[in-house]
Amino acid sequence: MAYRNGNYTAFYVNEPFDPSPLGANATKDFYYYNTLRMWKGADAAFPFVDSHEKTYSVRDGSNWDLTLKPRLRERIRSSKNIVLFLSSITANSCALREEIDYAINDQGLPVIVIYPGYDTKESLLANGFLKKEVKNLWEKLPVFRDSMGKVPTLHVPMNKELIKKSLQDSDFMVGSKKESGIYRYNP
């Protein structure tokens, strides 16, 4: 069994992949993933361990069944949780469905959901509960919506300090996860 110390980051990338030199970088959700990497680069103590760096890189044009899918699964198996960026541009792509389905339904990984359209704990909530607008984003990814009850899911805004706290929270790591359910930090 793989040593599970990484954070597997899932985000939407346009399909087919953008053939421009920017490739995946042309997709906004990829920008948010790069923000985590930037925070880690600027502060070695930032608790993000990028599972995508645990195997060699693949090209966007690689064969799905022979190269991409096995590589995603290998990275997920070395992860303690999944960090999902869910935004207004997220779409139900083949790769994102595979990542979420395998991570939750096969590997039982807890999910930290980051909502880039929100920046405070309070902005996610209405009357102490997740806003309807936040829950509506789950519809963009039915496999997540239908599977998230099987693992603990922590819902956080795009806020560096809250993300840092989330990544350090042992309740959202596969070896020490808390009971399945929907969680958020209270204001």
Image: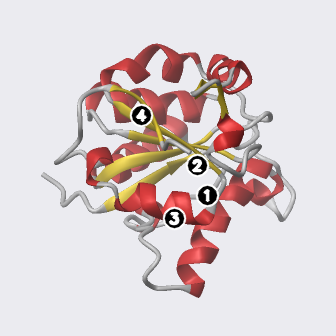
Mark 4, other Cα within 10 Å: few <14 / some 14–19 / many ≥20: many
Q: Earlier in the sequence, mark 3 or mark 4?
A: 3
Q: Would you say residue 12 is visible in this rendering?
A: no
Q: What type is the residue that disc 2 sits on?
A: Ser
Instruction: Report the Cα–Cα distance between label 3 and label 4.
Output: 28 Å
> Please, what secondary structure does the residue beneath circle 4 have?
strand
Number of other residues with Cα within 10 Å of mark 2, as a class: few under 14, some 14 to 19, many 20 or more = few
The answer to whether mark 2 and mark 4 are in CB contact below 8 A is no
**Relative to 68, does residue 65 appear above or below in the rendering?**
above
Kindly report which numbered mark, 4 or 1, lies closer to the viewer in this rendering: 4
Left or right: 108 in relation to 26? left
Q: CA distance from mark 2 to mark 4?
A: 31 Å
Do the numbered discs 3 and 1 sit on residues whose CB atoms are within 8 Å?
A: yes
Kindly state the secondary structure of the residue where label 3 is placed.
loop
**Residue lying furthest left in this view?**
1
Q: As shown in the figure, which amino acid type bears the numbered disc 1? A: Arg
Q: Percent position (x, y) of residue 73?
A: 36, 43
- The answer to whether the residues at label 1 and label 2 have Cβ atoms under 8 Å apart is yes
The mark nearer the N terminus, 2 or 4, is: 2
* Amino acid type of the residue that numbered disc 4 sits on in the rendered structure: Thr
Outermost right residue: 20
Labels 3, 2: front one: 3
Viewer-nearest of discs 3 and 4: 4
- In the picture of the structure, the residue carrying the numbered disc 1 is 59
46 vs 132, nearest the viewer:
132
Query: Which residue is tagged 2?
Result: 62
Residue identified by numbered label 4: 153
- The answer for how far apart the CA atoms under marks 1 and 2 are is 5 Å
Cα–Cα span, label 3 and label 1: 7 Å
The residue that appears at 27% across and 62% down in the rendered structure is: 5
